[in-house]
Every structure is written in C-alpha cells, then in structure tokens.
Amino acid sequence: MKVIEYLKNTKKTLFSFEILPPLKGKSIQSIYDGIDPLMEFKPSFIDVTYHRQEYVYKTHANGMLEKLSVRKRPGTVGICAAIMNRYHIDAVPHLICGGFSVEETENALIDLQFLGIDNVLLLRGDSIKTEKNFTPDPNGHNYALDLVKQVVGMNNGQYHDEELKDVAPTNFCIGVAGYPEKHFEAPNFNSDLKYLKMKVDAGAEYIVTQMFFDNKKYFDFVDSCRAAGINVPIIPGLKTLTTRSQLSVLPSFFHIDIPTELTEAVDKCKDDKKIKDIGVEWGINQTKELIANGVPCIHFYTMGKSDVTSTIAKAVF
C-alpha cells in the first residue's frame, strides 16, 4: 500500500522508522536484527537510505594514483525487496541525485516497479567528503525537485528514452524531505519553504522532516507550510540523543539546534548510560506531545540500532 494511503486511512498516529544498509560485504542479518525488536509496534512502512558513491585513491606499485568510485553501503533496492518478502511491510527506498545519471535513476525506478515497490522518498543527497559543495552527476539531477518531476513523468508514462513505444506508466507515491530549522544551504527560511512548495506542487504527496529536538520548531514549521499552501501530510522525524559527543556531532552534521534544557541535563551526566536514559526520556516526552497534537506518523531515525526506539515505542504506542 502507498504511504499516502496509510496516512489518509488512519485515525491514530502511525509508527515508522528508517534504517541504513549494512556496509559493503556485510550480511543482511544486521538489518533483520534491527527490525525484529520493532515489529511488535506494527510499523506501517520502513525507509531504507541510499548512499552515493565516494572516491578513494589507490596507490599502484609505480607510485601512480588511481581514482576509484566505491559505494560503502549498497543494496537499498535489494533490502527493500527482502523486507517486503520477510515482513510483508511496505519498504520505502530513498533515491538521491548525487552519483546517478537520469538514465540510472530511471532504471532503478523500473527495478522498483518490477519488485512491487511503489513508494519512494526523493532527496538531493549530501555532498561527499571530497567535495566542498554538492556536485551532481554530469548527466544527473541537481535538485530533488528534478527527481520529483522525473518520477511524476514516469507515472504519466513519460520515460527518459523518448523513442520507447507503448510504455507502461509507473505508480509511485512520492515523499520528500522538509527542514523545520531550514536547509543549511538555503539563504533563509522562506526561500527553503518556496522550494518545498515547488516539490509538492510538482507531485510530492507527503513530507518527512529532518530530525529535531524541539517540538515547537515542528509545529511552527507545519503552520508555515499551511500558510504557504502546502497541505500534504508532514511526518515528524525523530532521533534519540544517546552520547555526549552527539551534542556537537548532530548540530555539525545535520545543522540542527539542541535545546538548552537537554544540553544542560546531559552536561550533568557522568557517563553515557545516564545520557542515554536522559535522551530516551526526552524522546518519550517529545513523542507523547506530538501524538497528543495529532501528527499523522512518528518516523524514527534508528541508524540501524533499535534498542532506544523500542524503549520509546513501548512507552507511547
């Protein structure tokens, strides 16, 4: 079933989460180990991230360097198929701009259609470590908006290869990302909101937010979206703070704020076990408030670890 159908056909807040593909060469068992403890909460869908290629340099015997392209976490399409086969739950693969040509994106969408996967979350994706700024594939898309337009086109029977005859239209439900605290590259919040509306107007059917730790930022974001004419469901995305280092890592990498009350509570802790307890308590309270305000779904960023998400879910679902 499509994500938008789950959201429209429920009278209660749904539960969903996101996982990372295992590192290249690792078993899919780690995926199952992360999903199994969360099955009791009846997730409506499970997101699987897509990681773009990175570049490494291999030194040859003659001293010459060779630039090689590698994907550290391949397997998104296969993992989605495995999840649907094993758990009979809809999987939502992420598709990104970076590292993919338009044709490669089309081929990936065709594979997904053949597998019966009819949900996609479309993202521009981040720059890689060797890039100062995001650099798209020479034959790929620059922005998530372009991805949305490509998928909508395929849903209408328009393929990249214009010479194809009697093509079968796809039937994808499209999700996109939203940023309650503004995408870090946007010059201002209103500009960011304008581009989000363009994605929705182009055919995106729901929004999943970047993680946040202050619910007011989410509520204000929803109000701003509605005032701007964005009326699709907006799913809050949550992550649990579990270590002291995340006080600096999360704001640096994801460009988000952590509330003073939470940082002060963490500063008083002597070890990470106590910090995890503080983070879980914060997550429980945050989730309860969101549910009380009627959010359509709570989407947890598990990062492949289910223990804290399971603890929060037991307290609120």
Image (cartoon, helix red, strand yellow):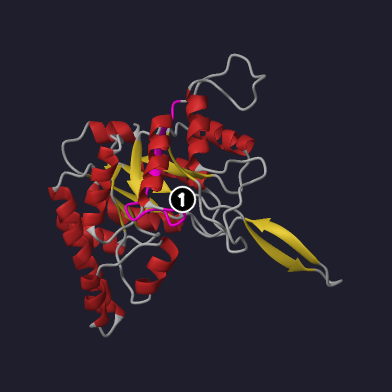
In the image, 73 versus 96, the foreground residue is 96
Identify the residue at horizontal 27%, vertical 72% (top origin).
276
Q: Name the kind of residue labelled 1 in the image.
A: Thr
Quadrant assignment for the N terminus: top left
Identify the residue at horizontal 61%, vertical 28% (top origin).
160
Q: What percent of the width, then of the height, locates residue 306?
A: 32, 60
- The main secondary structure of the magenta stretch is loop
57 to the left or right of 317: right
Q: What percent of the width, then of the height, locates residue 292?
A: 12, 49
In the image, 155 versus 197, the foreground residue is 197
Q: What percent of the width, then of the height, locates residue 103?
A: 63, 35
Residue holding disc 1: 49
Residue interval drawn in magenta: 171-187
Identify the residue at horizontal 36%, vertical 33% (top origin).
205
238 to the left or right of 64: left
| Residue that protrudes farthest toward the bottom in the picture | 270
Query: Quadrant location of residue 273?
Result: bottom left
Magenta run includes residue 147: no
Q: What percent of the width, then of the height, locates residue 213?
A: 27, 61
Query: Quadrant location of residue 129?
Result: bottom right
Q: Is residue 15 visible?
A: no
Query: Quadrant location of residue 193?
Result: top left
Magenta run includes residue 178: yes
